[in-house]
Image: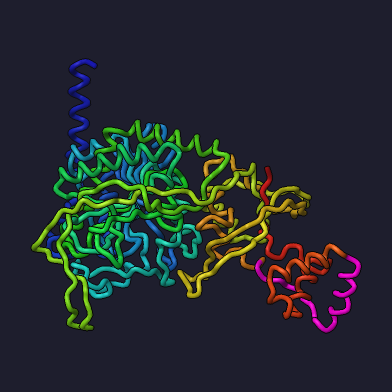
Amino acid sequence: MNKFSAIIIATFLTFNILSAQESFTPYPFKKEVEANRSVTYAKAIELYKAMAAKDKRIQVNEVGMTDVGIPLHEVIVDINSDFNPGDARRRKKNVLFINNGIHPGEPDGIDATLWLVQDILTDPKKAALLERLVLVIIPVYNIDGALVRNSSLRASQNGPAEYGFRGNGQNLDLNRDFIKCDTKNAMSFSELYTKWDPEIFIDNHVSNGADYTYTMTMLASHPDKLGYGQAAFLRTQMLTDLYKRMDIKSFPMCPYVNVWGTTPDKGLPGFIDSPRYASGYGSLFQSFCFVPETHMLKLYDQRVKATYAFMMSMIEYNAENYVSIKIERAKAIRDMKAAQKIPVAWEMDKIKNDTFNFKGYDYAYVKSEVSGLPRLKYFRDKPVTWKVPYYGYANATTMVDVPTSYILPQAYYKVVERMKMNGVKMVKIGQDTVIKGQAYKIIKTESIKNPYESHFGHYNTQVEPIEVTKQFLKGDYIIPTDQRAKRYIVETLEPQATDSYFNWNFFDGILNRKEGFSDYVFEDEAAELLKKDPPLRTALDKAIEADPALKTNAFGQLNFIYERSKYGEPWANVYPVVKVK
């Protein structure tokens, strides 16, 4: 490059930077958050649109609907003005997807991200960090809850003066809705997320659970559960680097404090982020997921600044390591596509741990002025550092064989819809077809007694594989597993998986027999069946021997015979999705 060309390019860049700086009046975020104020939903959208109207590096789009009839917004920040995933990939950029306001009573991320974007558009040094990064932002995800402004429903939270409500328009927690998608919000999110397929995902939150010195705590995709080569990179490189950067920014960070009913000095348990949660959902697509959790007892301005610092640390890390991030994730995607077995349920390792120097407060159990019983009290004037075990390892408890494809009956259209929202490629069967494969008999499942997020979900589901020859109809779906959404497919269609569609009640119809018998009529036929079928007689005798209560249960014995006769419904308790090897 000659000297003249360099001058022209420098002049052009300077002009663009100045234009960006002069294009809009910066919003006084520092003043606002220090005054304990958070922007409303309307103000947040207004500010993003004002920036987009004046600066070509930011774009604001409406993308899908929410439960209250207000569209979700997608904000894209790209210094090269390439506002679609294809352009980002061609320029060899990574995508950082930021979600805010999933719980609008935790608005730190809403303000911090607005502040961050404004600084990027007005500060050339910060803008330069996006040379290899595109920001995709949901300004406020739970618009429904954000419109319910209050100042009291987050008990003991230290500001801001007003904030939103945790539940959405259906009073559902959106951070439990990423698989079941009971809300339009979640449906819109799924389509947006899979469209961008981000390398990195940040879901901003606020938390409590104990009292301690840290303003910022953080959980990430569980490394072991994320797996496929990403675990080591996440543990030894990304997380280590982020902790150091936050130290430098004067916001030392610790793992998410999840010690309800005890105290941090006893140790910090890890968290298994099943796919119902934001980070667990993102992990299905091999994204490096992070959930910053500021501490609700800290001043609001400090929480916003800590959230800002975390997101900026991530942006800085990508600027220095974007190639490594892309390579490690690409390897994981390839390994996932080649996987013949996939874990679908996990438990924390209660033995293996690392040591963490936790900076907390001294505490004591003192007499409660309310109940007169012992209560926990922390002393903020007595900071203390404990060496505590951090139980950050997990083990798979259930592994499944991955078939070549799953066959999903079109009758389960709610599952079909959710598959499509998540980018799953499916092939419609062109004509009625008999297919041989493997199904599951549901041997046992337990259900919760009280509703959880509108569902009486199942758990501890036990299955028995059975070989079947089943007729599928024209319009039923073949779902190949050799595709990008492979892990999503397996973890939703395997009934034993923690957050499977079976466990979320999408297949409950199979658990109820639709026909029956009248005992006074069936008695004679049952007697004939036992005479004609000695193995059935033997099976009944063994069942009575194994369960003595059955000996005095006449209806139970008739039912045993009925279920094993030609009258029994062959599909009762048989999971209707078939695996084809």
Where is residue 422? Give x, y as percent: 51, 51
Tally of numbered tags: 0
- Residue 50 in sight here: no
Magenta region's main secondary structure?
Answer: helix
At 17% from the left and 52% from the top, the residue drawn is 26
Where is residue 560? Give x, y as percent: 76, 71
At 74% from the left and 54% from the top, the residue drawn is 472
Q: Which residues are magenta?
A: 511-533
Q: Is residue 157 above or below residue 81?
A: below
Judge from the rendering whether residue 514 lies leftward or rightward of residue 414; answer left or right. right
Judge from the rendering whether residue 563 lies leftward or rightward of residue 238; answer left or right. right
Please identify the residue farthest to the left as the structure is shown. Answer: 381
| Observer-nearest of 414 and 58 | 414
Which quarter of the image is occupied by the N terminus? Answer: top left
| Observer-nearest of 574 and 378 | 378
Which image quadrant is residue 368 in? bottom left
Q: Is residue 492 above or below residue 573?
A: above
Where is residue 354? Give x, y as percent: 29, 46
Where is residue 538? Give x, y as percent: 81, 65
Which quarter of the image is occupied by the C terminus? Answer: top right
Q: Is residue 77 magenta?
A: no
Please identify the residue farthest to the top as the structure is shown. Answer: 2
Judge from the rendering whether residue 182 lies leftward or rightward of residue 328; answer left or right. right
Judge from the rendering whether residue 104 lies leftward or rightward of residue 278; answer left or right. left
| Observer-nearest of 60 and 22 | 60
Q: Is residue 199 above or below residue 159?
A: above
At 41% from the left and 49% from the top, the residue drawn is 394
